[in-house]
Amino acid sequence: MQIVLAIILGTIFGAVLYWVGASSPKKLIAMLRLEDLTLMKIIVFAIGFASVLLSVFSLLGWFNIGHLSVKAMNLGVVIGGLLFGIGFGTVETCPGTCVAAAGSGGAKKAISAILGGLFGAWLFSVTYGFWKNIGLFQTMDLGIHRLQWQKTPWALLSRPRNTALNSSLTARHQAASWNTPAP
Amino acid sequence: MENNLWIKKALTLGTVFFLAVLLVKPIGVSTQFSVLSGIFHSALNETVITEDAERESGYRSTNPYYDKSDGKLARSIEHPWNYDFVFVLAIPFGGYLAYLANDKKRRSQMSDVDVTIPSTAKSDIRRYFPSFLGGFILLYGARMADGCTSGHMMSGMMQGSISGYIFAACVFAVAIPSALLVGRMPRRRD
């Protein structure tokens, strides 16, 4: 059943990425050069809309909170994001969109990017031990956090409150993590 | 009419991300690059991933990355036919269907890849190496951050994840200046 869903959702996702223009380097470069912000509007609106749907469905109890998966914050996110920005700004593609582009226009360049990506991912796997040893993933380790209604803004940076959602996330994080100090 | 189209696109994109998390889990792509490269890696070097019945995942690896989270990635490498991997394989298929559905005039507008690198470059290496190198940096960064545009930015920010917001800020802080710089570089005619 999951495999069927994977095929259906993956196909829709690829088609929508192409339709909104996210698989087109031309549109991405226009966005990053701040010449045509249509794609930016689409993406930001989509994030907001999905976020609203998520909140409404959770509120109504139609949403299985176990499906959420919030990623941990650490220095790797910052440095990785900066590196990612170099690639994103120069070749105007990202891992999802170059996979979508491989099936549509400009396939050869997209496939070159995928091959480069596979090599990059492999090199990261090999060098992961090094980064871990110098403490990249322990620095700025704020654990898993979501933006949520807090009485004080600085509470955002404290450990999450024990809401049902957060305790399930924290438990999952602790089960899955290799670097979080015991609470 | 054109003014409303972006809203329709945004609503559709948002709905797809929401449907994925409602039915299964948030969309993520870049982990599968690690899985696929790991498949090649373990095929070339069979000692990297070994079975270990004591573990829940059933596998252990000499590589700390495949081994992390109790060998979760090692398991995905040995048994790739799961939801995440098939999802990513289906993406180009969807892209192709949408490409076929598009008429020719729109196609050329959508998929002009030769914008950044002049197409006049002679050899194939000149033409495709920048994409290769870009993909390399992209995925190295994405794996270090543990997510890409889909995983961190779209799915992460949708869930209100702090790491998603920080990732997006870092990406655009570098991507916008570098796109502007690449645009200013004089194009070599050779």
Image (cartoon, rainbow, N blue to C red):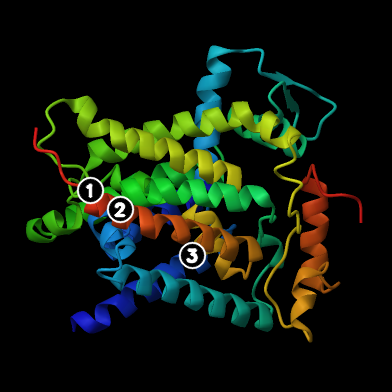
Q: Are marks 2 and 3 in contact (CB under 8 Å)?
A: no
Q: Which residue is mark 2?
A: B181
Residue type at the position of mark 1: Met
State whether residue A1 appears in this view: no
Residue type at the position of mark 2: Leu
> Which disc is residue B185 wearing?
1
The residue mark sitting in front, 2 or 3, is: 2
Residue A73 location, quadrant: bottom right
Q: Earlier in the sequence, mark 2 or mark 3?
A: 3
Residue at horizontal 59%, vertical 58%?
Answer: B24
- Mark 2, residues whose alpha carbon is within 10 Å: few (<14), some, or many (≥20)? few
- Label 1: state its secondary structure: loop
Compute the Cα span from label 3 to label 1: 37 Å
Left or right, residue B131 beside residue A180: left
Q: Are marks 2 and 1 in contact (CB under 8 Å)?
A: yes
Q: Which residue is mark 3?
A: B17
Compute the Cα span from label 2 to label 3: 32 Å
Residues B63 and B177: in front is: B177
Residue A71 higher or lower than B158, as above or below: above
Residue at horizontal 32%, vertical 46%?
Answer: A91
Residue A132 location, quadrant: top right
Residue at horizontal 66%, vertical 61%?
Answer: A67
Residue type at the position of mark 3: Phe
Residue at horizontal 26%, vertical 54%?
Answer: A24
Q: Earlier in the sequence, mark 3 or mark 1?
A: 3
